[in-house]
Image (spheres, rainbow, N blue to C red):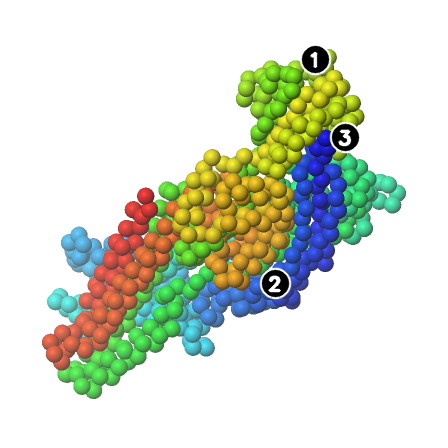
Amino acid sequence: MNTEHRSAKSCCSSGASADAQTTAQTVSGCHGNSGHSHQGHAHGPHAHGHATRGNTTAVIAAKPGQWTCPMHPEVVRDGPGDCPICGMALEPVVPTTAIEDTTRKVRFKFWTSVALTLPLLAIAMGPHLFGWHFDGMLAAVAPWLELLLATIVVGWAGSSFFVRGWHSLRPWRPNMYTLIALGTGVAWAYSVLAVLAPAVFPAGFRDQDGRVGLYFEAAAVIVALVLLGEWLEQRARQNTGAAIRALLSLAPPSAIRIGPDGQEQEIPLAHVHVGDRLRVRPGSKIPTDGIVVEGASTVDESMLTGESLPVDKEAGDPVAGATVNQTGTLLIRAERVGGDTLLSQIVHLVSQAQRSRAPAQRLADQVSAWFVPAVVAVAVIAFVAWAVLGPSPALSHALIAAVSVLIIACPCALGLATPLSIMVSTGRGAQLGVLFRDAAAIEALRDVDTLVLDKTGTLTEGRPRLSRVSAMTHAENDFLALAASLEHASEHPIARAIVDAARERDLALAPVESFESITGQGVRGIVGKQSIAIGNAAMMSGAGALVPPGAEDEAATLREQGASVFHVAVDGRFEGLLAVADPVKATTPAAIAALKAAGLRLVMLSGDHRATAEQVGRELSIDEVIADVRPEQKASTILRLKSEGRRVAMAGDGINDAPALATADVGIAMGTGTDIAMESAHVTLVKGDLGAVLRARRLSADTVKNIRQNLFFAFVYNALGVPLAAGVLYPLTGWTLTPAFAAAAMSLSSVSVVLNALRLSRSVR
């Protein structure tokens, strides 16, 4: 019986470097076939192909060294600055330490503003909240202290808001920074005038004690809250760049080059050229994509395929940079270097997907396009109307009305509406074992209708286990003990699976003599004076063991079920077989059933061979199974599904899943997987349980609903308060709204937003 499985070994794509001027790329590949074993153990086929990636967005035109807007990727600049559309700070196309520096600066400004705003609040609100009374010198100094503290917060910490607000006017594109600059600027300027020249204010501006109200604390609080949102946003963007930096770190820093005279020289990776001969020792990373010239070994390609089983390599076989050489020394010829390597292509795919994944515009920013000019227009109209038609002193009443309109329209509640809900939601998600990277992920998850699933490590445990022991003449435990004793001398994952199974049964292992590994066949040795051979048909033939037809049929059935099958001979006689498979997680079947019941279409996307993937798909009732795919093909598949109008989430755990996780509308990483997968994803499931996807989805829906409620509260207060502040009820009731009452109404709107956002802490049980 022939138990040898064939593995198609892929060469890395050529001519597919990230050309920044190109809007579409084709990743091509070539393949060859060869036996695949772990020191002689054969495994199933791993045929791979490449696909063409279509055009994604115009952002691909950006070059390394340029800067772009994370929300508007069509904005590209040669250096840092602010987006002319939304006002957000631009980020580098290829992540650098610059964003880390920006994050530190924003964090410092935020904490400084908090430190200065707290005493400012104590001075301003103490009399109202705690009944404090400032007399004598303290009463005279308090306004000047408020001015000093607020000026530092507004003029220094919030200076960028005024710059962005000014830029939003040229050209006319009002945004949230327009509101922030207008609100804080008016509140601060009004208060400064009240301190420096209180005599210019008529009685209508004064309280019952004759003092002009100050609104320094309102301006400072707005700046501090907005800085908090910016800090959280910068942290999310920094994490996005960490995924790419982690990918780049996979490549070794140096390579061993063989010179024309045969001498070895260690050189930096950047100095490797096409055609160079490179030595790769056991345990070392392969420096770049190439072809094996001499030697034979097994190579861990899990960073490309996601599969834990290593691949046999010999002369003529392709190898990929950053994969790990395991057992033997290889001499390779460099074929692709620098940006042409497969690793560089993966980096490009992740970077491209992250830049093209612009988060949805917040409703606040959408509304600001008409809200800002509407507020200013109302303030101007109110001033003119009171100046022309109002009672004496008309100008004083006009100024009170205009200032009240601008103060009540301060975007404090508007600025709180989204970030506060996001903060509460992310905290609740953490309690549920769901970590959201940013607000865009929370918003997008509720709209997902298609869930793409990696197989190994996501649906399955991600490590091989002994699934079948079939002995002919020996007792099952005795048979397993003999096989495990021989395999104990091997470090291959399948060998470890057999040994682990024996240890779980508390079987004693005997010492091995004359251990030998035969590439492409298997292993053999002497255990307790018995000659043991484990491997494929060629190994059985070499041992003189005849495999009966019944055993061949059993092996074929096991392979159809996705298992790797190995024959065992004892003293030249066939004595049975062992099957090793990657079992489905215990929690997976229930999670899959629940996801399907929720109306999600499930697609399995795996780098494993088709037979194994289809078997798992049938077992779990997956809607569609796509196998034999490489990392770039996974991203292409996601793009295809999105082009069909689907909202796609991708769940994976490996380095090879990173491009697809970044390309998906929502990337979901298993917390039990690689750091790079988690950094590329938008959501992380801490325990690696797919059942958490449903909890995350429900939390997403609740959060978006909560944000919309908050925005409704904020805008309703403005919709009711602005006309009242303008004095529309004065002719009927004699009611007007002073700046003090305007500030109180603004504070009340913030309180309602805070209380509503806190309800999310009880969301999803």
Q: How crowded is mark 1: few (under 14 residues within 10 Å), some or many (20 or more)?
A: few
Q: Which residue bears the numbered disc 2? A: 54
Q: In this view, does 499 lie to the left or right of 136?
A: right
What amino acid does circle 2 point to? Gly
Q: How crowded is mark 3: few (under 14 residues within 10 Å), some or many (20 or more)?
A: some
What amino acid does circle 1 point to? Gly
Q: Nearer the viewer, residue 213 or 181?
A: 181
Q: Is residue 397 left or right of residue 477?
A: left
Q: In this view, does 185 lie to the left or right of 60?
A: left
Q: Tell which residue pokes out farthest to the front in this image.
A: 549
What amino acid does circle 3 point to? Ala
SS state under label 2:
loop
Pinpoint residue 384: horizontal percent, then vertical percent.
24, 84
Q: How far apart are marks 2 and 3 (CA)?
A: 45 Å
Q: Quadrant of the C terminus?
A: top left
Pinpoint residue 464: horizontal percent, then vertical percent.
59, 33
Asked where in the image residue 497 lies, by quadrant, the reply is top right
Q: Nearer the viewer, residue 53 or 246?
A: 53
Pinpoint residue 13: horizontal percent, then vertical percent.
70, 54
Q: In which quarter of the image is the N terminus?
A: top right
Q: Which of 252 and 217 is in front in this view?
A: 252
Q: From this viewpoint, is residue 685 visible?
A: no
Pinpoint residue 345: horizontal percent, then vertical percent.
65, 54
Asked where in the image residue 331 lies, by quadrant, the reply is top right
Q: Which residue bears the numbered disc 3? A: 538
Looking at marks 1 and 3 on the same chain, the residue that comes earlier in the sequence is marked by 1
Residue 528 has which mark?
1
